[in-house]
Amino acid sequence: MNQLSMSFDEQRDVNYVQFDPKTVVNDLQKAIPELDLVGLVHSRKWCCEMLHCITAGSVATEEESNAEELDDGIHLNVTSKELGTSSSLYLMAKGYFDLREYTRCAHHLRNCTTGYGFFLRLYALYLDGLKHRCDDFVDVFPDTASNQRQATTKASLDNAWLMRLRTELTTCEKNQQLNGYSCYVYALVLKRLGLLHEALTYFVRTIKAAPHLWSAWEDLAMLVDSEQKLHNLDLPKHWIRNVFYARCYVELHKPELCVYICKELTQIGFQNSTHILLLQAKAYETGAELQLARTCCEDARTIDPYNLDSMDIFSNILFVLEDYHALASLAQKCIETEKYRFETCIVVANFYSIRNDHARAIQYLTRALRMNPDYPAAWILLGHEFVEGKNHAAAINAYREALDLNRRDHRAWYGLGETYEIIKMYNYALYYFKEAFALKPNDSRYSNALGEIYERTQKLHEAKKCYWRSYCVGDIEGNALAKYAHVCDLLKDEETTARAYMEFIRTQELRQVKNFTEFSQAAVFLANYHVKKRQYDQACSYARKCLEFPEVKNAAKDILNKITGLREGQQQLKEKESIQQQTSAPIPTAKSTIHEFDSSSTTTID
């Protein structure tokens, strides 16, 4: 697509909710200390960023701007009943929690069965389980990929800590109503256990009770696998719902809707929000508008040069654009900012990958997965590196890990199809390419891949349809018409082949970009085609185009020599026919001339 745009009817269906910026400011000011109280630091950070952006904009009044700097301490007037324990004990446990001493925090809150203390104990136990999972993570290297797969499978089956948490939460739910934060822990546990439908219900309950809990919105977005399910969610009419919808539209491959919402949000004061800019960059990347995506990422870095959120996506964009120097600069700045952040490891891995140092890239991706094994994009990149290193078994394992985390990621499906195609298991490749195509039917790369598999398995009519669809939806790679023409040639449809090759050459010359192999094959075919039609001028034109390519240069010379010979033969034939016409014409004799003269003269005399 050249520009991400939408019609008026589509804008109406977005369900964008209008809010007064002052209401947003007041809501954030109330949410931040409460999030600090319960230890949800990521949501608190997010709310602080949004508050800073909107209060620094033109919508803020002078009185509101005075409240821009907020104290990070806890100043909520809550009772011991609401805390579930004494304030001194809670604050001590909260200190352990902030230092990631989760077991110690849960131990001191072991008698809490209600309020914020109950939530903090459950959340500490949940995070402690995740921490042990990361600590037990096995390094992924080519020679240990199969062992790693067995280790991660064993870890996924060892869910005793999750079962204990679920049992306690279920018991508590029967005795009393869980508050919003406890519902959030319950939803996380259910999601980890694979009970996605039940988890979705509790995420919605969490959002209704605590709409400012952005982490719940993010986790809910990963469970929305269709636009219909998104619109069927019973969500509160909160301003954060707009950001949630934008996030979901990216996951559902509706980038134009995400961009629309992001632009609307910038109109009410979020024009300097790095979160909104990076979300918009993801949408542009999904829509193959890489230059616009790069601009959004650069704007976000200008606003906050030390922000590492989503910098792995920025590095992916630079990698595809093949901007080596920009990627090297980004990697250096990320290392200077925070060397052991998992986004930094992915950026550095992309840098080594663009240098074809795949062993170092695998090393840094492994380091990133040790920090965050639940990040599907890192698994996909790891699979790509294993493919480059010709370790196909390890690549398949990495792609499957990514699918276990997010089955809507078309890149993982495509990676599996590509890997199975390399090892010539075409039936498997066909299945995975179909799954990728179903998730992103308007991506010409996937219909092209399907066409190639059909062609390899001699299903030429299906391949022809796939290549034609690739051409119709945009043809990112620029060779769909050439492949379509090749299949038509195999089907002995010479006229369709010629028309397709003519259009392919015309398009390539307009773009001033030539796919050398396909272009030379097309030119050779058309030169021979016009020779058969005795259209020697057109044949010479296409044969001369072939002279640019060494692999078909000799064939082009043969065609030109053949045309020269045919033209000489044709000229000789014309000359021979002309001579024969002259020799076959009657030559007047002297007698006949005299007779004619006499008759004419006699007639004249009479």
Image: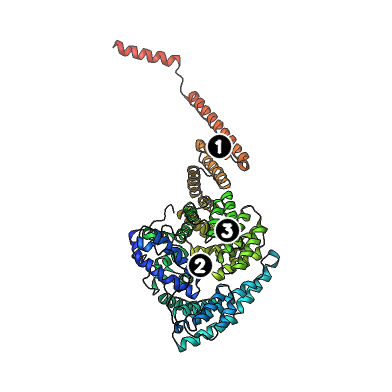
The percent coordinates of residue 510 (x first, y second) are 47, 43
In front: label 2 or label 3 = 3
Residue type, mark 3 in image: Thr
Residue 18 higher or lower than 568, as above or below: below
Q: Earlier in the sequence, mark 2 or mark 1?
A: 2
Could you tell me how far apart the alpha carbons at marks 2 and 3 are, in whole angstroms?
32 Å
In the image, residue 6 lies at what x, y percent?
A: 37, 58
404 over 277 or under it: above or below: below
Rounded to the nearest angstrom, the CA distance separating label 2 from label 1 is: 48 Å
Say which element carries label 1: helix
Q: Residue 54, percent across and down? A: 40, 61
Mark 1: few, some, or many residues within 10 Å (few <14, many ≥20)? some
Task: List the residue tagged with mark 2.
Answer: 408
Return the residue nearer the eye: 588 or 27: 27
Say how the picture is coloured.
rainbow
Q: Relative to 328, does residue 85 appear above or below in the rendering?
A: below
For disc 3, the marked residue is 337
Which three-letter amino acid code belongs to the residue tagged 2? Arg
Residue 544 is tagged as 1
Amino acid type at image mark 1 = Arg
Left or right of 573 in this view: 62: left
Q: Nearer the viewer, mark 1 or mark 3?
A: 3
Q: Residues within 10 Å of mark 3 (few under 14, many from 20)?
A: some
Q: Give the residue at the far top of this rendering.
A: 605
Q: Secondary structure at mark 3?
A: helix
Q: Position of residue 554 (x, y in %)?
A: 63, 39
Q: Are marks 2 and 1 in contact (CB under 8 Å)?
A: no
Q: Which disc is residue 13 wearing?
A: none
